[in-house]
Amino acid sequence: MSAHMLSGRELATAMRTQAGEGAAKLADRGVTVQLAVVVATREESAWWYVRSLEKAGTNLDIACRVVDLGPEASAESLAAPLGELSADGGVHGIILQAPLPPGARLPQLALQIDPDKDVDGASPVSLGRLTVGLPAFAPATAQAVLRLLDFHGIELSGQRAVVVGRSAVVGKPVAQLLLARDATVTICHSRTRDLAEVTSAADLLVVAAGRAGLITAQHVRPGAVVIDVGTNPTADGRLTGDVDADGVATTAGALSPVPGGVGPVTTAQLLLNTVTTASGRSGG
């Protein structure tokens, strides 16, 4: 048995095409779609993500402004540009890229982002609206997980879903989105006892723990769908997921690859969210 690979590349291409068409329509009306990314780290996996976003945006005529404040930035020096970008009418989307320097907290800083420009769903305002079912952008990676599942025709209603990871960036919002689609959801984390016992009962397993190779074949029920959200850099410059792909592929019914699964969909989703915001602000 070998798991069906849930590639995100075809879906991401379609989403980028949609974003590009929207950006072109706005350009015809004199509006240049602009996404601002505030970065305060030297972590390679974060910069790999930022560079991929820049490249994708450039190809679609979506301007991507990177504000590099360096890893020594204070919380105060991060808050100021977020407020300035929120007030800038030429900026349509804002991302505060994790990880942040010591002492800087994402939820507190994200409050400085105009909720209408919070295209990565980082603000507690956006997350609160998501929790109670009001319109808001979910974190793009969480959105990408659901988009990928839908694209590949994975049934969610009534399914037993286990999410490994409880971050506000992926784990919690993915759980909220799955609940909204009538899945029965369990969240696991570093204090979960006998992780394999819990995960091996899942029809759908979403892994976003940030630990390379955490999930092995013993953690997976035969035939289960496994979505690997991990992006862990290797010594030779590649990316690897939180799932031992070679081992799990012999047990799971379907598995998202790293790279090429959730990642490209996340990038496309951010650009699409930014175009959506720009369209709303310009009356499109």
Image: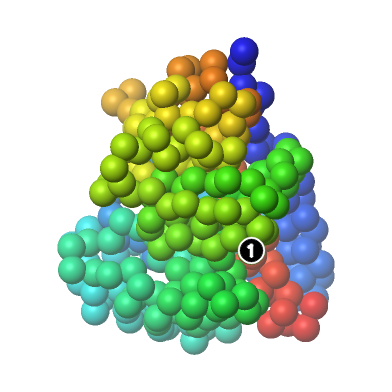
Task: State the residue at coordinates (63%, 79%).
Answer: 134
Q: How is the image coloured?
A: rainbow
In front here: 85 or 108? 108
**Considering only vertical position in the picture, is 24 above or below 8?**
below
Question: Does residue 194 lie above or below 189 as drawn?
Answer: above
Q: Circle 1 — which element?
A: helix
Q: Is residue 97 above or below residue 219?
A: below
Q: Quadrant of the C terminus?
A: bottom right
| Residue 268 visible to the viewer | no
Q: Which residue occupies the foreground of this view, 276 or 124?
A: 124
Q: Count every numbered label the image shows and give the total.
A: 1
- Mark 1 surroundings within 10 Å by alpha-carbon count, few (fewer than 14), some (14 through 19), many (20 or more): some
For the point 40% across and 81% down, which residue is it?
111
Residue 186: percent from the left, percent from the top?
47, 52
Question: Is 144 placed above or below 219 here?
Answer: below
Instruction: Tell me the residue at 33%/23% (across/down).
Output: 236
Q: Position of residue 240 (x, y in %)?
A: 41, 30
With 63 as the anchor, is 239 left or right in this view?
A: left
Answer whether residue 53 is visible to the viewer in this image: yes
Toward the top, the furthest residue is: 1
In the rendered image, residue 201, in percent from the top left (x then y), is placed at 50, 36
Q: Amino acid at mark 1?
A: Ala
Q: Position of residue 31 (x, y in %)?
A: 71, 74
**Mark 1 — residue?**
180
Judge from the rendering whether residue 67 lies leftward or rightward of residue 60; answer left or right: left
Which residue, as the protein is rendered here, is positioned at the far bottom?
87
Picture quarter containing residue 112? bottom left
What residue do we see at 31% from left, 56% from top? 99
| Quadrant of residue 210 within the rendered picture | top left
